[in-house]
């Protein structure tokens, strides 16, 4: 016959409670994360790199994104690799223009 003391039963009960709590916490986190992943966004971004006609990067160029519907503008300056990124753009029609010292301006409707 196998006997357990009250102390052993209590520690088994605590272990079971701990496992059960961990399980329900894991299920809650999983369900919550699926809900968060299902959220959509209504913002976009424009990113790229600016090169001259010979293929060299153009650092310090100013990129302007103009919302054709609201006339709002956002600007960014290219880094040392010619890269730029403009975020938090709402769905709309945009015109992108680029200016840099020593270069003719560029505008893409």
Image (cartoon, grey):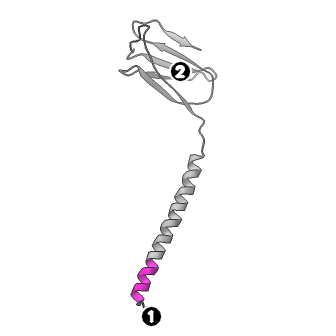
Mark 1: few, some, or many residues within 10 Å (few <14, many ≥20)? few
First-in-chain label (1 vs 2): 1
Residue at (54%, 61%) from the top-left corner? Answer: 27
Q: Is residue 40 magenta?
A: no
Q: CA distance from mark 1 to mark 2?
A: 81 Å
Residue at 63% from the left image edge and 22% from the top image edge? 93
> For the image shown, how many numbered marks are present on the structure?
2
Q: Give the number of the disc on residue 42.
A: none
Query: Residue 108: percent from the left, percent from the top?
Result: 56, 14
User: Circle 1 sits in a helix, a strand or a loop, which is it?
Assistant: loop
On screen, residue 14 above or below 55: below
Farthest residue in the left direction? 80
**Left or right, 92 with reference to 99:** right
- Crowd band around label 2 with a 10 angstrom C-alpha radius: few (<14), some (14–19), many (20+): many
Q: Which residue is mark 1?
A: 1
> What x and y, as percent, mark residue 10?
43, 84
Q: Quadrant of the N terminus?
A: bottom left
Residue at disc 2, secondary structure: strand
Which residue occupies the foreground of this view, 38 or 90? 38
- Which secondary structure is most common in the magenta stretch? helix
- Asked which quadrant contains residue 91, the reply is top right
Residue 8 lies in the magenta-colored region = yes
The residue range painted magenta reads 6-14
Whether the residues at callouts 1 and 2 have beta carbons within 8 Å, the answer is no
In this orientation, which residue lies closer to the viewer: 74 or 38?
Answer: 38
Which residue is disc 2 drawn over?
Answer: 65
Up/down of 37 relative to 45, above or below: below
Picture coordinates of residue 37 (x, y %)? 56, 47
Give the vertical position of 67 relative to 54 (above or below).
Answer: below
Q: Who's the residue at 44% across and 85% down the image?
A: 9
The residue sitting at the bottom extreme is 1
């Amino acid at each position: 016959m196998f006997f357990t003391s009250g102390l052993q039963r209590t520690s088994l009960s605590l272990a079971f409670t701990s496992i059960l709590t961990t399980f329900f916490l894991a299920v809650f986190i999983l369900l919550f994360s699926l809900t968060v992943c299902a959220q959509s966004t209504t913002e976009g971004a424009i990113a790229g790199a600016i090169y001259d006609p010979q293929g060299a990067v153009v650092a310090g160029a100013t990129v302007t994104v103009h919302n054709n519907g609201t006339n709002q503008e956002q600007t960014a300056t290219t880094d040392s690799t010619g890269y730029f990124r403009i975020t938090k753009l709402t769905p709309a029609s945009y015109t992108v223009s680029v200016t840099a010292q020593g270069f003719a301006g560029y505008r893409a409707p």
